Amino acid sequence: MKLRKVVAMFTLVAMMGTLFVGCSNKAASDKNEGNTVSEESNGGDKGTDGEGQQISGTITIFEHEYSYEDSLKEVIEGFNKLYPNVDVKYEIKAGQEYYSILSTAIQSGDGPDLFWTNGTATSNMADYVSNGVCYDLTNAVDYSLYDESAMNLTKVDGKSYSIPWLTLDTRAVYYNKDLFNENGWKIPETFSEFEKLLGTIKTAGYTPISLCAADPYCLLFAFEPILAAYDVDYTKGLADNSVSATDKPVKDVLDLMLGWADKGYFGDNWLGVADNNAQILGFTSGKAAMNIAGSWDAATISQNNPDLNFGAFVIPPEDGTTGLVGTPANGFSVNAASKNLDAAVAFANYCASLEAQKIWVQSQGAVSASPEIEASSEIAKEISSYGNGNIYRSWQNVLSTNSTDGKAANIFSNDFPVVFSKLLSVDDFLKEISEVMQ
């Protein structure tokens, strides 16, 4: 449920816009009003000897990544213990064509009963809501497990239309423990210590940070945690839009990172690093001491070099109080036109339960976004330990949700690498962004 994959789909969603225009908004609204859920599926889990027996039939789920298939199977198994008469089928629609396939299925009347979207992290779910596709789950699902950061993913115009997963898609600094031990390097406790460490590693003959300049998301997943450590108050302000996405701290950090590049902290040939795989290779090969990347990259790092002794930390601010940039991942919305709405909402309710959330978070080996769910992998536990109850909103999420038709996110994805190649100034880039922000 990663932003880098979803935002790449914006163009496809735009192409499908005319498809939805053909649907009468009134017809979609009538469908949503007339197809209401019964009490049996409203309000959480049901025992197999009670109301769970009263719901039956078949529902189909669309998921967007094969990496979630095993977790989904486990959730379905748990659901069927409570609702044994519901046959749950799923289809994995992986790739950038996901939204195109989903839109075509919905338009033809063969849409799934539940389907994945990225919630309000991108504009896709809001587009479906505006066209009457998503069922209003506000009063149909028990959301008591979620905090505000998770609930924000579900809401369009104050109503909830999806079920988040309490995996935290965050960012971390992966570091080579053997290199650190051999050279006597310590995990920094302040931002100034982190910056000093970069120079120390460079002097020792290693690349301090493996980073790809060609991919906007590789750059983003380094930029956001650096920004959070550089100015905590600004980063906290992103949550309630009390600050602007183009305020001075953003410029300061972009300038700082460009200065680090000039000093060789990302390697002498970092502009030639082609993609995230090459960035990871720079770290797993031992050439780079650190790699700032998404929490989901831990598994890839291990697969790339199973013998690598690595850990993770979060860049600390000057006062040493850390937090994690990111949001819980979004899960499923319910199709307002579902032919088995009771069962679909019952499944949504089960997904919102602590039991299902534990299954999902722990089977994914993910960083947990809930104090009630312990991470299952050691590296995820290590990253989670830096949360301290502070979850910071992604800067890119502000661009996606607070700009006209998501234009700022498109500018970011096109021009962020151009800024780091120095073909576009930081000032001109931020001016482009500010002109399309709401």
Image: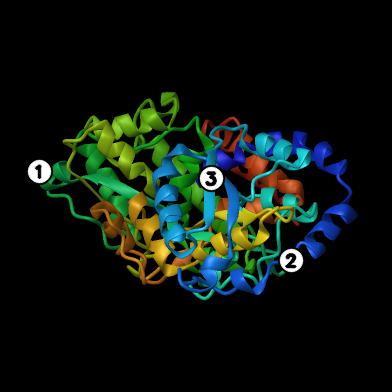
Between 2 and 250, the one nearer to me in the picture: 2
Query: Is disc 3 placed on a helix, strand or loop?
Result: strand
Measured from the top left, where is residue 399 in percent x and y? 64, 51
How far apart, in angstroms, are the residues tagged by discs 2 and 3?
Answer: 22 Å
Q: Examine the rendering and report whether any part of residue 207 can be seen.
A: no
Of labels 2 and 3, earlier in sequence is 2
Indicate whether 14 appears above or below 377.
Answer: above
Q: How many labels does the image show?
A: 3
Between 392 and 200, the one nearer to me in the picture: 392
Q: Name the residue under label 2.
A: 36
Measured from the top left, where is residue 381 in percent x and y? 28, 59
Task: Give the residue at x 62% y 69%.
Answer: 240
Q: Mark 3 points at which residue?
A: 89
Of labels 1 and 2, earlier in sequence is 2
Pointer 1 and pointer 2: residues touching (CB < 8 Å)?
no
> In the figure, residue 22 lies in which quadrant?
top right
